[in-house]
């Protein structure tokens, strides 16, 4: 179909979702997404790129994620709908910008699912069995490894097939385990061996320069990890009180994860045997298949290694399960934006699960697994695609403040006019730090999705299509210009060196602000926004009626009535 569904049609599909997730369950969803395979590999990969300065990379990544997350928290609370992250650009700028943002976001999230399965199998390859060691060849999964990872994909699929309540109960339990084990790992490794000379030797704190710290943010899995903050937003249709629970869940999940990742990074840096570093010659020369488990065995912590081998299934599987759930809601959102067949908007009435969308994501996950067989290669693709999807949040949140100033905003920060452009700058810098030619390759992947948009949109009359093209021009230009800057930029970020070092970062900042203001001014009251406004006002009126009906009851009765 070529136009967004009517309000009544959308409400019909969304009424099949179960509003059963509170703040704790949503925080567990966000934290469970963040603590997946990233904690098993992120410390080693970040150290390989930036050395001990990887500690700063995790902090920078958290600041970037928090800044961008604040923009999306306002949007998610305004429009608590399934697959929220793929909708906001459509509401503010129409079909072209909305589709590009949705495509980038979906690519970033759906590719995480095979990435988690790959991580589990890669850790399994360190088992002391011939068949297990044959699953991974040191760079990517073998044929048997791909088969094993495929079984895990099917496992994630079926955990989401039956009911959202099963998902919530399973995920909360898994998340508790996923938080406890990393904390135990960091503590045990620090107690077993804490060699501060690792930081002083082998090139010092920043052996590869400060540009490597920024590259580590983009490519080592840090963006991959923190990207989990958006999972609660994509589950917004199932939140009991989205205005309060969504921002709390998003912020709490990032802050808790930062503390855990910093502890793991320090434990890894101080726990690597001096002899191994000497033999490798540098942090980049280390070649662990299962980094934290290998360190545990090196210091005689066999019990911890066994626990890590078990958690190598549990942590990635928990994250894979979450992303299988959230991507299915994203597909539902893309369908309601008018860019997929109606079958993908169906939600099973009995279970509250969008089953056709689950099937589509399973097929795409298999394709990604067949093409990208290593955790590192998937992490790079996910990270850059994620950053591209981030840029619409800062623009959309301020655009909607301009277009719909009177719309109810359960979350509204006074500092948002300052936060939003800063978030745009941060996102653009991380995109640039991703290094050429990877940035160009991922931007090319964005273009691959355009035929789907064209199939639905180019059949419209020119007068109807024109405002969508005009409003989305800023985003198309942004991607092309950023690709050009990445190509011409400093050699330390993979460019040709036409733009001098230092000047390149200033150029990115100026361009980010210019495109931010162009994007905000390009927004318009398109049909999708009109429908969303009507739904939001209807929901606000229903809430007022509910509040009025609660007068005279004691607080306990009010809470019970609302639940």
Image (cartoon, rainbow, N blue to C red):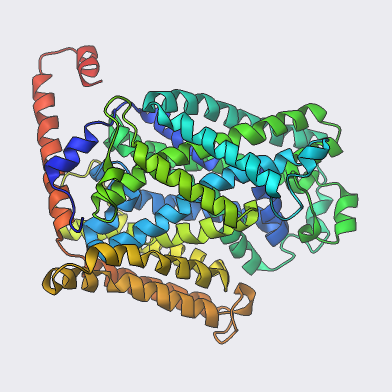
Vertical side of 280 occupied by 436: above or below: below
Residue 398 percent location from the top left of the image? 26, 59
Residue 169 percent location from the top left of the image? 45, 23
Q: Is residue 128 left or right of residue 85?
A: right
The residue that appears at 87% across and 51% down in the rendered structure is 276
The residue that appears at 81% across and 61% down in the rendered structure is 282
Quarter holding the C terminus is top left
Vertical side of 315 occupied by 449: above or below: below
Quarter holding the N terminus is bottom left
Q: Is residue 402 left or right of residue 262?
A: left
The reply to whether residue 66 is visible in this rendering is: yes
Residue 377 percent location from the top left of the image? 62, 58
The residue that appears at 48% across and 43% down in the rendered structure is 254
How many labels, in total? 0
The reply to whether residue 67 is visible in this rendering is: no
Q: Is residue 178 left or right of residue 2?
A: right
Image quarter of residue 242? top left
Residue 43 percent location from the top left of the image? 68, 49
Vertical side of 173 occupied by 483: above or below: below
Q: Is residue 283 left or right of residue 86?
A: right
Front in this rendered view, residue 137 or 164: 137
Front in this rendered view, residue 169 or 334: 334
């Amino acid at each position: 179909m070529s136009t967004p569904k009517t309000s009544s049609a959308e409400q019909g599909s969304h009424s099949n979702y179960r509003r059963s997730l509170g703040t704790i369950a949503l925080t567990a969803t966000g934290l469970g997404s963040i603590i997946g395979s990233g904690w098993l590999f992120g410390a080693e990969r970040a150290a390989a790129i930036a050395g001990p300065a990887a500690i700063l990379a995790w902090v920078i990544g958290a600041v970037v994620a928090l800044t961008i997350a604040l923009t999306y928290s306002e949007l998610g609370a305004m429009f608590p709908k399934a697959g929220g992250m793929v909708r906001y650009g459509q509401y503010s700028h129409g079909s072209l910008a909305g589709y590009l943002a949705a495509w980038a976001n979906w690519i970033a999230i759906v590719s995480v699912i095979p990435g988690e399965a790959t991580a589990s199998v890669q850790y399994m390859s360190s088992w002391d069995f011939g068949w297990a060691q044959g699953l991974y060849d040191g760079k990517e999964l073998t044929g048997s490894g791909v088969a094993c990872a495929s079984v895990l994909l099917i496992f994630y699929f079926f955990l989401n097939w039956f009911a959202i309540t099963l998902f919530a109960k399973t995920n909360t339990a898994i998340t508790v385990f996923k938080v406890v084990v990393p904390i135990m790992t960091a503590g045990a490794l620090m107690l077993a061996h804490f060699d501060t000379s690792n930081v002083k030797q082998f090139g010092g704190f920043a052996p590869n320069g400060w540009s490597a710290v920024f590259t580590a943010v983009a490519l080592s899995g840090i963006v991959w990890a923190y990207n989990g903050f958006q999972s609660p937003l994509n589950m917004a249709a199932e939140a009991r009180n989205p205005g309060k629970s969504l921002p709390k869940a998003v912020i709490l999940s990032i802050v808790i994860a930062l503390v855990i990742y910093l502890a793991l990074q320090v434990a890894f840096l101080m726990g690597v045997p001096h002899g191994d570093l000497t033999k490798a010659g540098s942090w980049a020369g280390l070649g662990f298949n299962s980094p934290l488990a290998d360190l545990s065995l090196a210091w005689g912590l066999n019990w911890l290694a066994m626990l890590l081998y078990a958690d190598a299934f549990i942590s990635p599987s928990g994250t894979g399960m979450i992303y299988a759930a959230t991507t299915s809601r994203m597909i539902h959102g893309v369908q309601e934006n008018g860019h997929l067949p109606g079958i993908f908007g169906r939600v099973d009435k009995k279970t509250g699960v969008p089953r056709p969308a689950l099937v589509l994501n399973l097929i795409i996950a298999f394709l990604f697994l067949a093409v990208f067989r290593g955790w590192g290669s998937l992490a790079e693709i996910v990270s850059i695609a994620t950053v591209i999807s981030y840029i619409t949040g800062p623009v959309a949140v301020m655009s909607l403040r301009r277009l719909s100033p009177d719309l109810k905003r359960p979350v509204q920060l006074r500092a948002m006019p300052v936060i939003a452009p800063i978030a745009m700058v941060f996102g653009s810098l991380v995109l640039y730090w991703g290094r050429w030619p990877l940035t160009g390759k991922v931007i090319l992947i964005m273009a691959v999705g355009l035929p789907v948009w064209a199939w639905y949109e180019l059949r419209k009359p020119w007068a109807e299509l024109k405002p969508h093209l005009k409003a989305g021009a800023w985003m198309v230009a942004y991607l092309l210009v950023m690709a050009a800057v990445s190509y011409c930029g400093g050699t330390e970020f993979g460019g040709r060196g036409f733009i001098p070092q230092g000047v390149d970062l200033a150029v990115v900042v100026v361009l980010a602000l210019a495109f931010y203001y162009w994007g905000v001014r390009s927004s318009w009251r398109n049909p999708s926004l009109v429908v969303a406004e009507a739904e939001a006002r209807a929901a606000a009126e229903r809430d007022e009626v509910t509040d009025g009906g609660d007068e005279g009851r004691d607080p306990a009765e009010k809470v019970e009535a609302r639940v």
